[in-house]
Amino acid sequence: MNYYQMVFGGVILILNVKNIQSECEQIIENHKFIAKCYDSDLREVNALQQKDLYSELRVIDGTLEKLRKNAFEYPRLTTLKLIENGIENIESRAFSNIPSLIYLDLSKNQLESLPSRMFESNAQLRILNMSRNSICNIEHDTFIRSSNLIKLNLQNNLLTSIKKYIIEPLTQLEYLNLVNLFLYGNNIEVLPPNLFRFLRNLQILSLEDNQITDLSTDLFKNSRESKLTNLHLSNNRISKLNPQMFKYLTSLKELSLTGNPITHIEPGSFDNLIHLSTLTLNQNSLKELTSNMFSKLIELNKLRISDNGVTNIEPGAFNSFHGEYPDETSHILNLDLSKNNLTHLSYSMFAPLTRLLTLDLTFSSVKTMDLNVFEPMGDTLQTLDLSGNQIEELNLGIFDCLENVNFLGLNRNLLKTLPGELFKNMVFLESLGLSENMLKTIPMTQLFNIPRLLEVKLDQNQLINLPPEVFEGEDCKVKRLHVYGNKLTYLDKKFLERSQIKHIRFGGNPWQCACLNEIMNDVYRLNVQIINPEFYFDGGNPACVVTKNNTCIRETYLAEDLFKRYQSVKHLKYFNVGFFTWYT
């Protein structure tokens, strides 16, 4: 049969399928014939003609309900997708007549159990997806002769345990090829000792969203040749870690323990994880990070300890040791300590993090900091976020060592003033966040005269004036300015013209209408873009306050009174004409 005959045969196939009231079609992808039956009432999978053509069959959102013995008669089929068909029962050897099957997807059905010898004739099967069913029982010989599986997905079922006899059929060969095992989203409480003992080629093991309370010290015993690189244990019920849990996982690169009630990590728990690059401990109950806690993790790049309630970090907590010698250039590049209770940040906490690139300390109750707190990471740090804390004052010099930082977040603190030369040494700073503080004024200095600074956010402070000098100067390159929700009633004449600002967000201020008129003229004349204009000129909020003489009075003493009047307008009836709003 030549190519054109095969295509013609496909057309006949479509007509025959239609005759049995099924919505199926034939497509050709990469010279492979695929039958697609979406939202069909196909109940008999062997109803399709010319079965020897097909390498893939997709029946999705159908009504198959049950698969009987020898249910498929497609000798060349390598891929079978039976997704969301309401399948409740599969008989043994249902797939016996498709020996070339490589990929099988049975996800989103209603299976409760898997029969004996389910894949006995499918020795080539490599990827098996049975996620999002209701599987609670797997027979001891379900996976007999399935030793070529490289990916097994059983996530989001109702399994309460994984018995060794389920895994044992997969270990008959000397070198098992199972690579990815997904068991998350079940109700597994206990993992038997030695369960993964012979899975020497297992690389990814996903056990999130179960009910696991402990890991047996023998769970991975004798797996010294283990290739496991990713272990996911998030959202279980593990309360403590000990040195035996991960003893044999020397190839592990990523370990996730988010969302457990871990209160204690015994010394040495991570000592054998010498190749670990990412450790995630978010949303636990750790209160203290102890000295040398991560010292043997010599390849650790990312450390996440967010949302724990940590109140204390002992000196040396981030020490790193090579042999018996401390490594003063710890490999940690990204550190997340957000949502903790670190009221004071000291120099000793962060030594020797001399390679750090990003530091997240958002919403960590920080009030005060040592003047030299950031010195250990001064040469490398690029992102520093201190937003959402309780910082009232920043001492001059605290950021002097951070020449390479390009993002600095200070939003949602309690800052009332800023030293005039606070950011002078931050020559690579590109984005500065100061929104939601209590700033009333900006120093009449070239505070933002930083050669690479492009964006400044000052939204929702209490500013009553913006000195034009702040955005002037040869090195001031600020292009985006956010001053939404302050108490500004005017801008100095030629404020925009004297700056390089090309984008501005300025709604939510009690502008004098006459002053706003001047600002808008400058905006149009200089081709400055208004950021989020739809939230300002939508007719739903007042744009400005009309003064008696309708002239722009550039005096700050009017700010409080105009602000009160502006706020009162929000609660009265008003109407819009252009961008002006009068209250009645």
Image (spheres, helix red, strand yellow):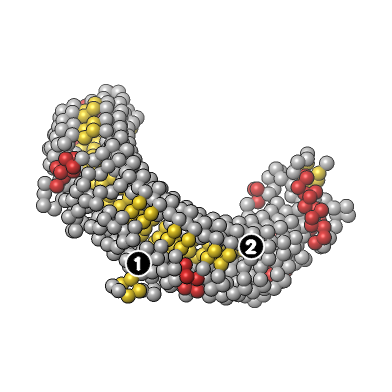
SS type, badge 2: loop
Camera-side residue of 455 and 571: 571
Q: Residue at x 74, y 49 (%)?
A: 543
Can you tell which mark lies on residue 338? none
Query: In the image, what residue occupies the spot 28% across and 36% down?
Result: 159
Q: Residue at x 64, y 65 (%)?
A: 393
Above or below, 135 against 394 in this view is above
Q: Position of residue 113 (x, y in %)?
A: 23, 31
Relative to the observer, which residue lies in front, 468 or 170? 170
- In the displayed structure, does residue 426 sit left or right of residue 53? right
Give the quarter of the figure containing the N terminus.
Answer: top left
The quarter holding residue 287 reads bottom left
Element carrying mark 1: loop
Q: Nearer the viewer, residue 378 or 498?
A: 378
31 above or below 463? above
The C terminus sits in image quarter: top right
Horizontal side of 197 relative to 363 (left or right) equals left
Crowding near the residue tagged with mark 2, few <14, some 14–19, many ≥20 C-alpha atoms within 10 Å: some
- Which residue was labeled with disc 2? 392
Badge 1, how many Cα within 10 Å: few under 14, some, many 20+?
many
Spot occupied by residue 279 in the image (x, y as percentages of width and height): 36, 58
What residue is shown with label 1?
295
Q: Nearer the viewer, residue 307 or 465?
A: 307
Q: Tell me: residue 434, above or below residue 152.
A: below
